[in-house]
Image (tube, grey):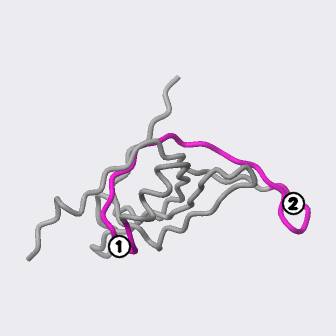
Amino acid sequence: MFNEIILIGKLAGRPVVKETQNGVKLSTIVVDVERPYRNNLGIKDHDYIRCILWKGIAQEVADCCDIGSFIGLKGRLQSRTYETSDQQTSTVMEVKIEHVEFLEKYLVSK
C-alpha cells in the first residue's frame, strides 16, 4: 500500500511550535493550495490543508517561515478520531509532514 502526499502552497497562518507533555515539539499549520483549474466564474479556488509537523521540522518551519511563505511539503495522509466537548466522536484528516522545502528562493519578483 502507498500513502504519499506532495503539496506546494503558501502558509495561511504563522507557524507556532508547542511541546507535548513528553517535551516533543509539535506545530500544526494550514497550507493554502491553489487548485489547478478555474471554477465556473473563471476564478481559481483554493484548498486549505491542515498539516502536522513534528520535532526538528516543526522548529525549522517556525524559524524560517511566516504567513504567505511559499513551501513544498511531502508527507502522508492520516485520520485522527477524538471526542468533542459535547461527547461526540469526530474524525479529521491531516497530513503528517516528513519533509519540507523552502521555495521562496524560486519566486521571481516582478
Residue 29 falls inside the magenta stretch: no
Q: Which residue is depicted at the point 90% across and 68% down?
A: 86
Front residue of this view, candidates 11 and 42: 11
- The residue pinned by badge 1 equals 68
Tell me the SS state at disc 2: loop
Residue 35 place in picture, x, y as percent = 34, 60
Q: CA distance from mark 1 to mark 2?
A: 34 Å
Residue 70 falls inside the magenta stretch: yes
Front residue of this view, candidates 107 and 94: 107
Please tell me in which quadrant of the rendered image residue 17 appears. bottom right
Please tell me in which quadrant of the rendered image residue 89 appears. bottom right
Neighbour tally class for label 2: few under 14, some 14-19, many 20 plus, Cα within 10 Å: few
- The residue pinned by badge 2 equals 88
For this orientation, the residue located farthest to the front is 23
Q: Which residue is depicted at the point 39% across and 72% down?
A: 66
Amino acid marked by disc 2: Gln
Dominant secondary structure of the residues highlighted in magenta in the image: strand
Neighbour tally class for label 1: few under 14, some 14-19, many 20 plus, Cα within 10 Å: some
**In the rendered image, the vertical position of residue 18 relative to residue 42, given as above or below:** above
Residue 95 place in picture, x, y as percent = 53, 48
Camera-side mark, 1 or 2: 1
Amino acid marked by disc 1: Gly
Q: Which residue is depicted at the point 54% across and 59% down?
A: 50
Q: Which residue is depicted at the point 46% across and 42% down?
A: 98
Stretch of the chain drawn in magenta:
65-89
Quadrant placement of the C terminus? bottom left
